[in-house]
Image: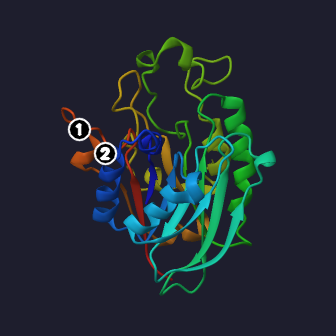
Amino acid sequence: MFWNLFEAGIDRVSGDDRRWQAQVEVVRRQRPRVLMTTEGWGWHLDERAFFEEARSAFDMDGELFVAKTGCHQAVFWQRDVRAVEFEHVPHALADWHGHGAAVLRLPGWSTPLRFVVAHLDPFSPATRRVEADRLRRYADLRGYPTVLAMDANTVPPGDREPDLSLVPRHRREDHLMPGGRTVDRMPLHRLTGEEDDPLFVDAGAHLGDRRPTFGFHPPAEAPRRIDVFLLTVDLLDLLDSYRVVTDPRLEPDGDRLAASDHRPITIGLRRR
């Protein structure tokens, strides 16, 4: 499962745990074997107190990837899974939030799997392209089979064109092709390659589910699919399911805050 946790950490620093408690309930209900998250705001503070609370609340082990922007990412795994190695990107080499990787050995699998969590620049198509180019090395089939989950802040090739008239004027250029009038899709195109010569495979698109994962609330956003699972081609035959999670906690209701402005997404893989 992958989930952008929005501003729950910022809320918690201010003393408001409501959004966080809703997130804990969603994760507990889904019970993912591996959980990748982004926007772990404040998780580095007080000897990583929020991160340690997350490990306890989810009843999972985990690794925190501290971002120079404060938008931290993490990989969590159930306690019968064994961690093999981690990769932390030096801040000097991260263009924005950066990324992290955990190699895990899951029970019943004949080989470890690598889980990469990333969050691309929300403001600059140029930076997103550079970030995507640096992630492409994980498609090397000489390494571990890889699951790459990210908030791409860009729309995949083949998805419907979002209505950017809903977005404030000063933010529209964040999403457009430089010099163009259509949404920027190049970062994900450079990660997925051509249909007849793929690099990573977009799990949602492969299984025909292109539902939006973002843009429902707060207002002034265009619904679109920017949260994605990308798989190396050696995992494609093992892809069993892809799902955009629905849960009433994901919607605001009166005074109740929505758990996040992003929908969690999940995939299922058959063991090999």
Q: Disc 2 on helix, strand or loop?
A: helix
Residue 96 x, y percent position in the rendering: 68, 40
Q: Amino acid at mark 1?
A: Arg
Q: Which residue is mark 1?
A: 256
Q: Give the quadrant of the N terminus.
A: bottom left
- 10 Å neighbourhood of mark 1: few (<14), some, or many (≥20)? few
Earlier along the polypeptide chain: callout 2 or callout 1?
2
- Mark 2 and mark 1: Cα distance apart in space: 8 Å
Q: Residue at x 44, y 27 (%)?
A: 162
Q: Which residue is mark 2?
A: 18
Horizontal side of residue 85 vs 53, given as left or right: right
Q: Residue at x 55, y 14 (%)?
A: 170
The correct choice, above or below, for 241 with respect to 142 in the image is above
Horizontal side of residue 235 vs 3, given as left or right: right
Contact (Cβ within 8 Å) of mark 2 with mark 1? yes
Give the quarter of the image for residue 70. Answer: top right
Residue 202 image label: none
Residue 72 x, y percent position in the rendering: 58, 50
